[in-house]
Amino acid sequence: MNDVQPPGPTDLTALAAGIERTNELLTRVLAEVATTPSTHAAFVDAGYVYAAAGRLVAGTEDRKAFELDAEGIIEAFIDKARMIFPDSRLLRVYWYDGARRRIHTQEQQRIAELPDVKVRLGNLNANNQQKGVDSLIRSDLESLARHRAISDAVLIGGDEDLVSAVEAAQGYGARVHLWGIEAAGGRNQAEPLLWEVDSQRTFDLDFCKPYVTRRAGVECAEPQVVEGPVPAREEVRFVGARIAAQWLSERGREWVATLLPGHPYLPGAVDQDLLTTAEALLQHSLRAHADLRRVLRDGFWDHVQGQY
């Protein structure tokens, strides 16, 4: 059996010196961490801001019918974040929008020239629907959180398919704060998104009004919904399936198949299209009925999945 020799005086001195050096190193690291400012970034879905602010102030989501002072509202968002995160520095504001062939419009060029603002463009299809914007937001939010470039993320949008990005960013230690714009008579942000974020904030009419100006002489391209009685859940589900069948016929199986990987979520533009089409058929607004909107999506998915 081997005898274990107790450490001698020299070994104890070396051990004590090593512990002291380690403590000094930890003290310096902790001091540096304590003095390093937090960093936040804002991720703005421009399509959501235009639609929600236009609807709230001008009564329409049609961009042709009103002007949005993008520079002014971006500065207002920055000021609000400065108040909420007083000990944090701004990394930048990411402004996500759509454009034909991803070529900046003159307005988007002006926004891109603003300090601390990065314009990121998805595509804009023939139906003026944004494509690829949500994936850009997800990519940037996850990447910055993963590399510890931000401690807080302000997300201004409402699409349900951003839930996975929120969860990923939180998994890397970032806090995600969802900001939205007031919706008269309902919500314009997906409930699953509201459930996942760390905090919520809604801007009202008084906040948005200075940045939206109605264009004179421009007619709104808004569908008119004549309010009837609140439809039954079975009727809403049937309408969802009916729209799915119509889109399969008009847009083709390949287009509808692109939606399947996102189940049970729909891209924001598609979800909005489903909502407005259903409201016209039902002759009733569903914007204040989150439960019926879920039933509508269920009916849509029931038909789509039954075809594949």
Image (spheres, rainbow, N blue to C red):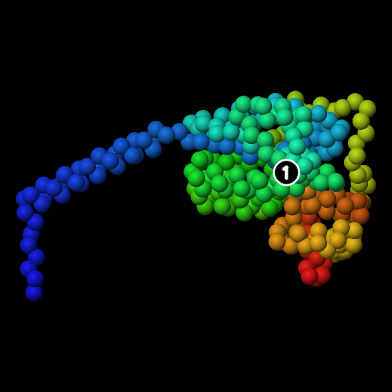
Kindly identify the residue that appears in the image at 81 percent across and 26 percent down. Answer: 213
Kindly identify the residue that appears in the image at 81 percent across and 62 percent down. Answer: 254
Image position, residue 224 (x, y; %): 92, 44
Q: Residue furthest bottom?
A: 1
The mark tally for this picture is 1
Is residue 63 shown to the viewer in this render? Answer: yes
Say above or below: 122 vs 240.
Answer: above
Kindly identify the residue that appears in the image at 92 percent across and 54 percent down. Answer: 281
Say above or below: 278 vs 107.
Answer: below
Is residue 242 shown to the viewer in this render? Answer: no
> From the viewer's perspective, is 12 left or right of 98?
left
Dividing the picture into quarters, in which one does residue 265 lie? bottom right
Q: Quadrant of the C terminus?
A: bottom right
Q: Quadrant of the N terminus?
A: bottom left
Three-letter amino acid code at disc 1?
Gly
Image position, residue 154 (x, y; %): 60, 39
User: Label 1's element?
Assistant: strand
> From the viewer's perspective, is 154 left or right of 206?
left
Image position, residue 210 (x, y; %): 75, 25
The residue pinned by badge 1 equals 122
Image position, residue 98 (x, y; %): 75, 41
In-front residue for pair 195/17: 17
